Amino acid sequence: MAGKRTDYITWDEYFMGLALLSAKRSKDPSTQVGACIVDHNNKVLSIGYNGTPIGFSDELMPWQREGSFLETKYAYVCHAEMNAILNFHGDLRNTKLYVALFPCNECAKAIIQAGIKEVIYLSDKYKDTDATIASKKMFDTCGVSYRQYIMGNKKIELDL
């Protein structure tokens, strides 16, 4: 009798993979971020990516990063974490959030308010910004743990 497969992906690989796949839905030409929320049973509760709110056409979106606030994407984009939280209609207390980029301070507030207790992130490229420093201060104060997911050499390909 043959044993079980041993080359299956881990839960972290699976959920970070879902977050990264979700990021592929983003229309943002410079930054694509995805998020995945799971419960203590490793059940996927919600996913999200950075994009415009429902009803606000991404065709009308100013996708620029520079310029006056109202002429940039920053006034209009919902971050992946916010979308994942808002896409779920239920209790998110004691869940985990997998996200491609460490959450900004605004998303950190939503994560804390939702009761999410752990954040697993891929990149912390803005770690020296005030927004990220504030996020970590809020997480530390409110008991939200966070850890960086370190990708291995494994490559997962999807043929569609």
Image (spheres, rainbow, N blue to C red):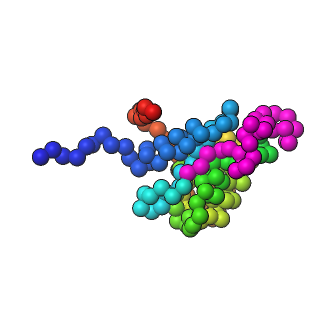
| Quadrant of res 31 | top right
**Residue 60 falls left or right of residue 136:** right
Magenta stretch: residue 70 in it? yes
Magenta region: which residues?
A: 47-72
Q: Residue furthest left?
A: 1
Coordinates of residue 3 in the picture (x, y in percent): 18, 46
Magenta stretch: residue 34 in it? no
What secondary structure is the magenta-colored segment mainly? Answer: loop
Residue under the image location 62 percent in, 64 percent down: 114
Q: Nearer the viewer, residue 77 or 147?
A: 77
For residue 65, above or below residue 137 = above
> How many tags in the picture?
0
Coordinates of residue 4 in the picture (x, y in percent): 22, 46
Residue under the image location 85 percent in, 42 percent down: 69
Coordinates of residue 55 in the picture (x, y in percent): 73, 49
For residue 83, above or below residue 143 = above
Residue under the image location 61 percent in, 56 percent down: 87
Q: Quadrant of the C terminus?
A: top left
Q: Residue furthest right?
A: 68
**Residue 27 falls left or right of residue 72:** left
Residue under the image location 65 percent in, 44 percent down: 50
Coordinates of residue 46 in the picture (x, y in percent): 54, 55
**Residue 61 falls left or right of residue 97:** right
